[in-house]
Image (cartoon, rainbow, N blue to C red):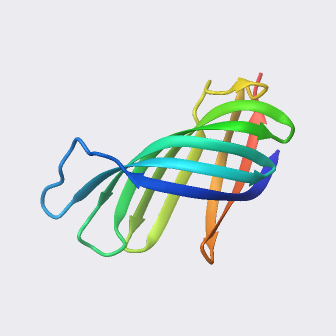
Amino acid sequence: MQAKGTFEVKLQPLASYAQGADDINLGRMSIDKIFSGDLSATSKGEMLNAMTSVQGSAGYVAIEQVTGVLSGKSGSFVLQHYGKMAQGDNFLLLEVLPDSGAGELTNISGKMTIRIEKKQHFYEFDYSFDG
């Protein structure tokens, strides 16, 4: 199954534990999202990122818990992010954390893709219910 729509995201810097060295900037941010479309939900999470001194090269990992309604089913699940940029060449993976589904979204699995066009965020979420 596939869900499509848009989302708004708000990122806020948080106090960091680790300090970067050798021109590496380590950061931590809060994530707040509002999803519209086939997924009507909100999410909260945290991101860790590292930015290098080379323009366009960075990486991040994040965890966010999504709570709302997906194609008529209500509940929650966790998305795990892995992203990296190598001088502008991007890779991004968002997957549902196994066994994180709750409510009517129990046993959910899937992957989400994100694209940004003219400052608007779009998602496509390919998902299924195992078991």
Image coordinates for residue 38, horizontal then vertical, percent? 81, 49
- Residue at 26% of width from left, 65% of height from top? 52
Q: Give the quarter of the image for residue 66.
A: top right
Q: Give the quarter of the image for residue 55.
A: bottom left
- Which quarter of the image is occupied by the N terminus? top right
Q: Is residue 47 left or right of residue 115?
A: left
Along the line of sight, the residue nearer the viewer: 93 or 39: 39
Image coordinates for residue 33, horizontal then vertical, percent? 60, 50
Q: Is residue 85 left or right of residue 93?
A: left
- Which quarter of the image is occupied by the C terminus? top right
- Residue at 44% of width from left, 43% of height from top? 46
- Residue at 63% of width from left, 66% of height from top? 115
Image coordinates for residue 126, horizontal then vertical, percent? 74, 47
Q: Residue furthest left?
A: 22
Q: Is residue 35 left or right of residue 51?
A: right
Q: Residue furthest right?
A: 72
Image coordinates for residue 130, horizontal then vertical, percent? 75, 27
Q: Is residue 1 left or right of residue 64?
A: right
- Residue at 23% of width from left, 70% of height from top? 53
Image height of 118 relative to 58, above or below: below
